[in-house]
């Protein structure tokens, strides 16, 4: 199935360990990118390696990031070119992040989301697929902006 690259800050270690076990039970290959203890760490130090490895990998890899509330990881992750990180707190949110936004990084809140919901979110996100169609055009506009194409044209164009 999928290779799942997982990283967190100190507040997400317990959830990370549960995700590693969940992946194994559900036929996915977990890659624990740390940390291994609850000693305080800076979330960007774990977000960037997970995201870069996910974005630059061949095949279907999924990145999962966890921090206390999820916002810090999501902000850091989306600074990496090619990342489409989505902070998801429900199964439906995860489904649409994948199917409409072609998200490749799932961000979870260790504080706001219980384990039962996290399992549902993981299932929806990891097993979800991009719908393409009209959504492809929208995702391409994001990629175009990220590449700096709007600077070449003088401004961003609608349509």
Image (tube, rainbow, N blue to C red):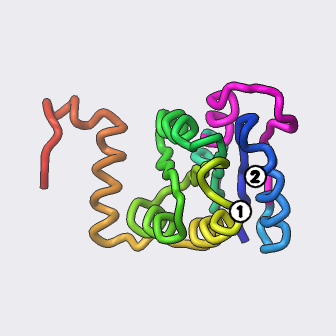
Q: Residues within 10 Å of mark 1 (few under 14, many from 20)?
A: few
Residue 109 horizontal/vertical position (percent): 61, 49
Residue 48 horizontal/vertical position (percent): 62, 34
Considering only vertical position in the picture, is 63 above or below 9? below
Which residue is more in the foreground, 75 or 33? 75
Considering only vertical position in the picture, is 4 above or below 128? above
Residue at x-position 32% and y-position 53%: 140
For residue 20, side relative to residue 94 (left or right): right
What is the C-alpha distance between the residues marked 1 and 2?
8 Å
Whether tag 1 and tag 2 are in contact, CB under 8 A, the answer is yes
Which label belongs to residue 13? Answer: none
Considering only vertical position in the picture, is 59 above or below 72? below
Quarter assignment of residue 9? top right
For residue 23, side relative to residue 129 (left or right): right
Dot 1 falls on a residue whose secondary structure is: helix
Dot 2 falls on a residue whose secondary structure is: helix
Q: Which residue is mark 1?
A: 115
Q: Earlier in the sequence, mark 1 or mark 2?
A: 2
* Residue 42 within the segment the image draws in magenta: yes
Quarter assignment of residue 51? top right
For residue 146, side relative to residue 151 (left or right): right
Residue 56 horizontal/vertical position (percent): 60, 45
Quadrant where the C terminus is found in the figure? bottom left
* Residue 151 within the segment the image draws in magenta: no
Q: Residues within 10 Å of mark 2 (few under 14, many from 20)?
A: many
Which label belongs to residue 15? Answer: 2
Residue at x-position 82% and y-position 34%: 38
Which residue is more in the foreground, 70 or 113? 113
Residue at x-position 64% and y-position 41%: 68
Quarter assignment of residue 18? bottom right
Question: What stretch of residues is rendered in magenta?
Answer: 30-51
Which residue is more in the foreground, 25 or 159? 25
């Amino acid at each position: 199935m999928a290779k799942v690259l997982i990283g967190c800050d100190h507040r997400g270690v317990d959830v990370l360990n549960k995700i590693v076990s969940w992946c194994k039970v559900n036929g996915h290959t977990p890659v624990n990118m740390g940390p291994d203890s609850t000693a305080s760490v800076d979330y960007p130090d774990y977000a960037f390696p997970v995201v870069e490895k996910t974005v630059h990998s061949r095949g279907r890899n999924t990145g999962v990031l966890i921090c206390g509330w999820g916002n810090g990881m999501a902000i850091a992750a989306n600074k990496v070119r090619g990342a489409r990180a989505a902070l998801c707190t429900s199964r439906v949110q995860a489904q649409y992040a994948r199917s409409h936004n072609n998200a490749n990084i799932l961000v979870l809140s260790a504080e706001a989301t219980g384990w039962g919901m996290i399992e549902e979110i993981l299932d929806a996100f990891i097993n979800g697929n991009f719908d393409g169609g009209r959504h492809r055009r929208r995702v391409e506009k994001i990629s175009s902006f990220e590449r700096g194409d709007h600077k070449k044209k003088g401004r961003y164009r609608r349509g």
